Amino acid sequence: MFKCKITKKKIPQIINFGKMPIANGFLNKKDFKKEFFYNMGVSFSKDVSLMQLNNHPKPEMMFNANYPFFTSSSKFMKNHFKNYANWAKRKYVKTDNTKIIEIGSNDGTFLKNFKKKNFQHLGFEPSKNVSEIAKKNGINSITKFFNRTNLITFDKFVNKTDLIFGANVVCHIPDLLEFILTCDLALNENGKIIFEEPYLGSMYKKVSYDQIYDEHIYMFSISSIKKIFNIFDFQLIDVFPQNTHGGSMRYVLGRKKTNVNKKINKWLEIEKKENIDNISGALEFKKNCELSKEKLQYKLNNIKKKGKLICGYGATSKSTTILNYCNIDSKIIDCIFDTTPNKIGKYSPGMHIPIIDYKYFSKRFYKYAFLFAWNHKKEIEEKEVSYLKKGGKWITHL
Ligand code: SAH
Ligand code: TMP
């Protein structure tokens, strides 16, 4: 039994994915022996409809000066954040002097769109390397975690912030209650919290269990967000599905007095019908994960038996879950091609598959390429258009 991080009640473990390294812990050969591992299991709290990781490394082990993920590494995501900003300006910016905060602002890709006279902005970004890049681009990036202690020093933003934004970050915050209390402290009476995160319903549908890794402590649904924020002076007022990261949901929260969009009720009914708000969905998902693992191992072993070579494409944090859960090492996948300078030349966490500059992908032919960055499929297939023509085949676990 484990404790629900919100209600503190005991809840059962649903799936055990086994021993896992740090998902973004790409490493050099000399560091193989001292690599850190933890046991990755998930449980489900029926009270708040929440899927959570049971154990995870401390945030400081993941979000530090070596954080290897840069939002701007995807053209598609850059464009997505531009649209996200324009949408928010149209819908929620009412005053001339709008104060906004972004949490997990990374290299400043989103906040760049608010570097205008009529906005005052702050980005909380604990990972020093990405935060420094944002600063160089003129973003007021604070190299700290978003919590009350760190917020209070910016009195212009205490009780006066209009909008708090986030993307792919709220699910990274172990102490969600502290996160909500910090939002409460920052926001004015009409303030809104707007964030988007991978959606539990999409993960169930696709059996994309690779969304589960150390940084993703929670897999949210509309039901869970509604229930958790209801504990405080907030309520869910609107939702907008997104096609990013394999299926995400954008949530808008306001104070309890704010009008609620009626469409939320329809969504809640769907989540009930599809067992997204209760434990049956989680149990079904467990079975599907086990099946997916068997199928993938069978598929890869068959390719190897035929003497064909397999490479990976996109050394994503998600790939760490697939490789370690399914026990796929460099005897099966020779190498993984990637664009990220911090990953190139290193080895994948746990399974130690070499990471190679994507420039060599078109020069060395692999009959099969495992698309770990499946959520960037369109962008990558466009970039590597000659691969199929040469007879290459993209594969995934999905
Ligand atoms: N929002 C960006 C980055 C997502 S990666 C995007 O969607 O592309 C998650 C980011 O959140 C990392 O840069 C990490 O350093 C940061 N982060 C993690 N925990 C945080 C916290 N408690 N407060 C603020 N930022 C945090
Ligand atoms: P993500 O799934 O967490 O967004 O990580 C994407 C990874 O894929 C990151 O390491 C960069 C890599 N990548 C490529 O190698 N080529 C590409 O065209 C894109 C979009 C990403």
Image (spheres, rainbow, N blue to C red):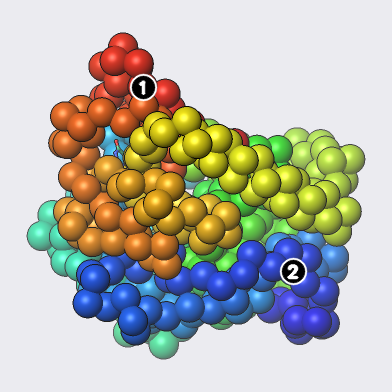
Front residue of 14/368: it is 368
| Looking at the image, residue 219 lies above or below residue 109 | below
- What residue is shown at x 75% (from left), y 81% (from top)? 2
The answer, for residue 167, to whether it is visible in the render is: no
Residue 354 placement (x, y as % from top left): 27, 55
Query: Could you say which quadrant of the image residue 301 lies in?
Result: top right
Q: Residue at the far bottom: name it.
A: 149
Q: Mark 2 points at which residue?
A: 43
Residue 118 placement (x, y as % from top left): 26, 49
- What residue is shown at x 43% (from left), y 43% (from top)? 372
Q: Mark 1 points at which residue?
A: 392
Mark 2 element type: strand
Location of the C terminus by quadrant is: top right
- What residue is shown at x 69% (from left), y 68% (from top)? 16
* Three-letter amino acid code of the residue under disc 1: Gly
| Looking at the image, residue 31 lies above or below residue 311 | below
| Looking at the image, residue 48 lies above or below residue 88 | below
* Three-letter amino acid code of the residue under disc 2: Ser
